[in-house]
Amino acid sequence: HPHWYSPETGIYNSKHPSVELPSDPFLDVVSFFFSHQHNGASALIDSLSGSSISYPELYSLVKSMASGLHHTGISKGDVVLILLPNSIYYSIVFLGVLYLGAIVTTMNPLSSVLEIKKQITDSNVCLAFTIAEKVEKLQALGIPAIGVPENVNLDSKLTTFSAFYKLLSSCFELAPRPVIKQQDTAAIMYSSGTTGMSKGVVITHRNFIAMAELFVRFEASQYEYSSLDNVFLAVLPMFHIYGLSLFVVGLLYLGSSIVVMRKFDRNAMIKALDRYKVTHFPVVPPILTALTRGAKNVGGSSLKSLKQVSCGAAPLSRKVIEDFIQTLPHVDFIQGYGMTESTAVGTRGFNSEKFQNYSSIGLLAPNMQAKVVDWNTGSFSPPGSSGELWLRGPAIMKGYLNNMEATMSTIDKDGWLHTGDIVCFDQDGYIHIFDRLKEIIKYKGFQIAPADLEALLISHPEILDVAVTVALDEESGEIPVAFVVRKNGSRLSPEAVMDYVSERVAPYRKVRKVVFTNSIPKSAAGKILRRELRNLMNSRL
Ligand code: 4UV
């Protein structure tokens, strides 16, 4: 057996040397952030307008934001919602809130009122930052809301955003710092985990510090070039753990420049890569496909500055990877894997590795351990055999918010996070991901919990029973499909079912196919047999 695998315990250790993490229990993300100050390059650049924030400006804006929030009455333990698209202001709000020991919860800005209501109630939000159109909607839900401008310079005179500009220009003395421990909660992100409805993932200051060190700084330490020369394009949404970890927290520790795109657009993306001489581009599979297409259109001589593209969050086919590599042969390609529950830390590939490794999700991150467990027998799988991936290490969440039962069934008594992903380590320690045991659907890399959609569909007066499952889709990777049992006499159409859902959820969570059926396959205990449904679905396609 290789030295990094123990057949006695079934434990895989990282092949990387371990990284030292700060041991002081009284340390928070923002103090840690301020202890790595940078000069020079722009920290954040708005791709559309070219407006930018320098590192020195960023540090002072975070402090102003914290002071202003303190004077608004925000204090340790309060939960602040960030309901924004990507913005050069995102990190300022995020770090400003954390500076006070308060907690951030993030959300897709396209979420429906129903979804917003659910999350603000569950996480107990007391203040929100959002786009102009959503300010009144939040206030109607009883949440004070601050409008954040999309356009950096032009909007500064608009009264809609006066509260925000007031916070940014707060020249109060610095807010008094409460005592913040590494183990205190920093953020509540939402994920459905391996089963059931969407739940609050409690992420601590320690988790973010570990993420910054084990994922972002460790990876940068492997490059020959300096992180200060790196320019990242931020298309991935900052409200999701992948974008949040990189663009809102991790890369700003390193002093890289981040070009922020407010929303995805293929042509604008290609232009931004060129205009800002982007060197690193983290993507999800549909963006990788769009990048290959866009690069073909502009010809091979373009995108010369690009050094690395990394892809994660959803399965990727070998064909898509090969197409990319053939189109942009000068660019290093790697895959990464992480979860909301592991603060995005998991595995990452390496630049310039053998071609066969492109289809792997890479090596285990430093300081992290894994087990691969046969889900039928509970026995440990050695390199070469597959099983469910379990992860342990300093980036694993504290647990699910107010949900002891889900926490205990996800993190066992020895601290292993059961990921619900089926993987296999090869003899070189590279990890390959095959399938999922868990219920989530990954639409363009976004999570959809079948149980959330089922709860919504069953509230329809003409629906007797329902089960939502996943179907493969060329463009989006995976789409949700609803198997619906109509009530006696109902003539409900598939379109009416889909409309019912789309009026109540963010666009990415729409049901995209409806199959009427007479019954839902269930176990004797009444649990939906999801694998059976999935097989049924795939056989019908
Ligand atoms: O909770 P979540 O939505 O989280 C993510 C995180 C993605 C990351 C994080 C760090 C990286 O370096 C990176 O490249 C990607 O998506 O969903 C977690 C689930 O998404 C699936 C898998 O089922 C996880 O449990 N998933 C994540 N990455 C991959 C993946 C991948 N590379 N290939 C296949 N499935």
Image (spheres, grey):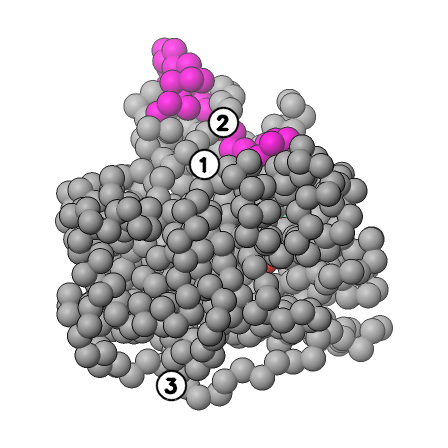
Rounded to the nearest angstrom, the CA distance separating label 3 from label 1 is 40 Å
Name the one closer to the observer, 26 or 2.
26
Q: Which mark is residue 26?
A: 3
Q: Local crowd at mark 3 within 10 Å, few (<14), some, or many (≥20)?
A: some
Rounded to the nearest angstrom, the CA distance separating label 2 from label 3 is 48 Å
Q: Which residues are magenta?
A: 471-500
Total marks in image: 3
Residue linked to disc 2: 512
Rounded to the nearest angstrom, the CA distance separating label 1 from label 2 is 10 Å
Of the residues tagged 2 and 3, which is closer to the observer? 3
Residue linked to disc 1: 508
| Residue 210: percent from left, percent from top | 52, 74
**Which image quadrant for residue 305?**
bottom right
| Residue 536: percent from left, percent from top | 62, 28
Amino acid type assigned to the residue bearing label 1 in the image: Tyr
- Closer to the chain start, of discs 2 and 3, is 3
Q: Residue at x 61, y 80 (%)?
A: 19
Q: Residue at x 45, y 64 (%)?
A: 43
- Closer to the chain start, of discs 3 and 1, is 3
- Is 322 situated left or right of 66 in this image? right
Q: Local crowd at mark 2 within 10 Å, few (<14), some, or many (≥20)?
A: some
Q: Is mark 1 within 8 Å of ligand 1?
A: no
